[in-house]
């Protein structure tokens, strides 16, 4: 399974390198649907990205949560805007009921339909483009058969969000813990983005010359970058453990660790790049915005901390 997952990572990485340059990501984010439809089709047809968690007898690839996490981590490195996270969560919601809707799952697995799960109606992933919308109150799931949508102007241009209001719903069943799964998958994406942000910063300090030498050769910056490497690797270990053994506790730990690491690395990246980091031309400002946007999505870090505290005290 490890070899297969490594191959999956490599395949996604190759597609991202070829079709998701920084310029392409910006163009996709500015498009009408907020993502590159051609790249999405390639991810679905060549990789089966949208089919990973769906069983084979329902038209999927019969993969595991770790497969979806691996793909999201690779996409996160380049901040690639895709509807994968929302679609995967919608599939898991539909799969949790006694009699899954094969037709709905088939469309989602093929990538021809876009899905999302509503945890907060005022802040919904893919809300402006979703065909299949599942609502949850933390205990029960419902299918939103009709709904009103209001696209939001988010700080992070690579993460389309919308406010969604249900007008007709039908009950589906008990919530299997989708918020925890969402936290783990989002944490995996954050780790990918954090690691790439650090890589870009290290490369910049090698290229940027000051006082006749690369700034990365100065001891103070070496120490700071070493600390950042430890931060992202430590957080990755926590996230990997949560992917391998999902639980409410591991999900909260993963989200907290990933959010803190990514926010720290993005902030330091801005400092080390200097004034250029906050210009529109710099990619670092996009990572900075993704870091802070992701940290607040699906519940701020302080909420995860309170959850963990309640289990200890």
Image (cartoon, grey):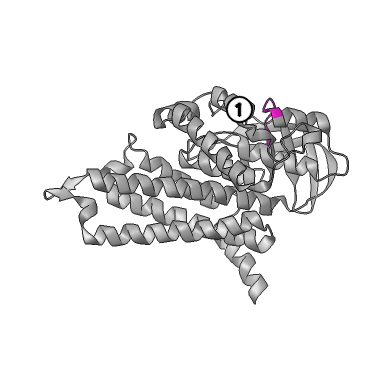
Using residue 103 as the reference point, say whether residue 204 is left or right of it: left
Q: Nearer the viewer, residue 191 or 256?
A: 191
Q: Residue furthest right?
A: 99
Tell me which corner region of the image, top left, top right, bottom left or bottom right, holds residue 307.
bottom right
Name the residue furthest front.
3
Task: Say which quadrant the C terminus sits in.
Answer: bottom right
| Residue 253 in picture, x, y percent from top left | 59, 62
Residue at the farthest bottom position: 313
Depth check: 162 or 217 in front? 217
Q: Residues within 10 Å of mark 1 (few under 14, many from 20)?
A: few
Position of residue 201 measured from the top left corner of the image (x, y, whole percent):
33, 47
SS majority, magenta: loop
On screen, residue 284 above or below 271: above
Residue furthest to the left in view is 212
The x, y position of residue 258, in whole percent, is 51, 55
| Camera-side residue of 95 and 302 | 95
Q: Where is residue 275 shown, x and y percent of the image?
A: 26, 45
Q: Using residue 36 as the reference point, say whether residue 119 is left or right of it.
A: right
| Residue appearing at x 21%, y 54% in the figure | 217
Q: Which residues are magenta?
A: 110-115
Q: Where is mark 1, residue-wise?
A: 46
* Residue 192 among magenta residues: no
Q: Residue at x 71, y 36 (%)?
A: 61
Asked if residue 125 can be seen in this view, the reply is no
Res 131 quadrant in image: top right
């Amino acid at each position: 399974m490890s070899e297969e997952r490594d191959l999956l990572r490599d395949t996604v990485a190759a597609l991202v390198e070829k079709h998701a340059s920084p310029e392409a990501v910006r163009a996709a984010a500015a498009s009408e649907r907020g993502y590159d439809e051609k790249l999405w089709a390639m991810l679905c047809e060549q990789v089966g990205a949208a089919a990973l968690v769906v069983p084979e007898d329902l038209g999927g690839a019969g993969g595991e949560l770790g497969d979806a996490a691996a793909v999201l981590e690779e996409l996160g490195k380049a901040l690639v805007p895709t509807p994968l996270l929302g679609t995967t969560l919608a599939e898991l919601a539909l799969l949790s009921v006694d009699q899954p809707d094969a037709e709905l799952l088939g469309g989602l697995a093929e990538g021809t339909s876009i899905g999302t799960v509503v945890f907060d109606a005022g802040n919904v992933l893919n809300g402006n483009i979703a065909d299949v919308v599942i609502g949850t109150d933390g205990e029960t799931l419902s299918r939103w058969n009709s709904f009103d949508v209001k696209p939001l102007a988010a700080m992070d241009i690579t993460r389309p969000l919308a406010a969604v209001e249900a007008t007709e719903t039908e009950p589906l069943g008990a919530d299997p813990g989708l918020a925890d799964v969402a936290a783990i998958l989002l944490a995996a994406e954050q780790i990918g983005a954090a690691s790439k942000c650090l890589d870009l910063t290290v490369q910049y300090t090698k290229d940027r010359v000051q006082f006749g030498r690369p700034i990365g050769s100065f001891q103070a910056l070496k120490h700071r970058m070493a600390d950042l490497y430890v931060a992202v690797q430590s957080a990755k270990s926590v996230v990997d453990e949560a992917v391998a053994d999902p639980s409410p506790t591991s999900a909260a730990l993963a989200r907290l660790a990933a959010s803190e690491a990514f926010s720290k690395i993005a902030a330091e990246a801005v400092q080390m790049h200097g004034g250029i980091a906050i210009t529109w031309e710099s990619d670092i400002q996009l990572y900075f915005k993704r870091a802070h946007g992701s940290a607040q999505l699906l519940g701020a870090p302080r909420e995860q901390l309170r959850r963990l505290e309640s289990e200890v005290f």
